[in-house]
Amino acid sequence: MSEQSALRTGAGAVAITTATVLPVFLLGALSVQIGADLGFDPAALGLVVSAYFGVSALVSLPVGKLVERLGSRLTSRIGLVGASVAMLLTAVLGQSFTWVVVLVLVGAWTNVMGQLATNLTLARAMPPGRLGLSFGVKQACVPLATLLAGLAVPTVGLTIGWRWAYVIGAGLALAALVVAPRGSGRGERSADSSAERATGALAVIGVAAGLGAASSTGLSIFLVASAVDSGVAPGLAGLVLTLGSVVAVIVRMLHGWLADRRAGGHVAVVAGSLILGAAGVVLLAVPGSVALVVGTILGFGLGWSWPGLLQFAVVRLNPTAPAAATAIVQVGVYAGGCLGPVGFGLIATGLSFATAWIVAAGAMLVAGGGVLVGRRMLVRHRATAQGRAREGVPASA
């Protein structure tokens, strides 16, 4: 692949991932305007977002199989058109909170399909020496969707209305069709069939990733409220959250860049990031601005920097069916995104923010240990496959 083709493929993957995840981020960013118009409060918003990730977890496996069967060329475009239609219908038919909820939940599959289709595209088309970086950039673009949604508030939501923000979002999703990479067609599979999916090991890693995701969701959702509750000024708390988001973007890309420069150990790095990130989350339970800043940097920079690296490792270990393999892990990540905010909110309300952060740190620590257990299972599976096939495997765990 030429340098230009690699850049086009990477840019297309970023566009698809950003456009298909945009609907739910628009709901969060425009919640004040939508809530004032349709009559719902932040608690209801939290339940809707949790339900969104719950639906995503339920559809992840069947969508992964569909992406493998139909190829990323078609499914990535289906995801973009589906996201566009979902946003357009929200703008036109969202005349009540119930309708908005229905449309958001029905459209959850578009994000899943966009994610898995781009995983398959990168696995098939990106040069091996750029694959890690491409996954890091792809996952770093999730904060880009947050940024776009945030910009929609002052530029559109507060000027011409929140419905026009969804109309513009629908247009952006359709525009992404222009830069969508060619991708793989129906039935195009790798000739390397020596590695069968280690479903048991992937399931263990998926559960661990779910715990890590459940802990990490508290960082972006509750960090400001927790800091203000401990006496930090709201302005400073918001700036610290912005700092954490920037750190997360940089470290996700750094993880990918470094992954391209080592032969293996990717899953072990994920585990180490979770374990060290737990130390940062513990610091969030300590009062004071210094603990807040250091805890946020460690929590975002390590505890929530691993998704792209984990997807890269799973793809390298499962070249014959990368979309289906990453779908197994994504079930856990989406389930964590569903249950994490609810659990954290209940603990913080019933006990305290400090207790909630300590529990989140414990869950992140357990997640790191679970990833190590899954890695050991992957190594054992690889050794067995080598003995049967008398061939090398595509990558080290």
Image (cartoon, grey):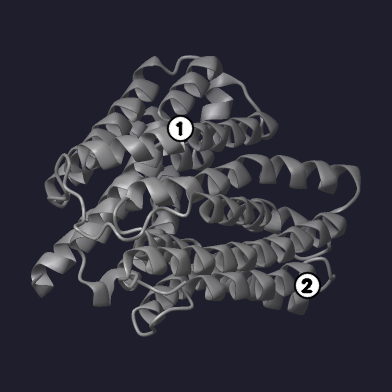
Q: Residue at x 62, y 46 (%)?
A: 336
Q: Quadrant of the N terminus?
A: bottom left
Residue drawn 45% across the image and 57% down it? 143
- Nearer to the camera, 96 or 101: 101
Residue 297 falls in which quadrant of the image?
bottom right
What residue is at 64 percent from the left and 36 percent from the top?
46
Which of the numbered marks, if any, corresponds to residue 283?
A: 2
Q: Amino acid at mark 2?
A: Leu
Which of label 1 and label 2 is nearer to you? 1
**Going by the image, does 374 lie left or right of 155?**
right
In the rendered image, the vertical position of residue 103 relative to residue 308, given as above or below: above
How many labels sit on residues?
2
Along the line of sight, the residue nearer the viewer: 166 or 297? 297
Q: CA distance from mark 1 to mark 2?
A: 36 Å
Mark 1 burial class by Cα count in 10 Å: few <14, some 14-19, many 20+: some
From the top left corner, tell me how far across and down residue 245 is, in percent. 52, 65
Q: Which residue is mark 1?
A: 59
Q: Kindly tell me whether residue 168 is visible in this rendering.
A: no
Q: Position of residue 210 (x, y in %)?
A: 61, 51
Instruction: Give the secondary structure at mark 2.
Output: helix
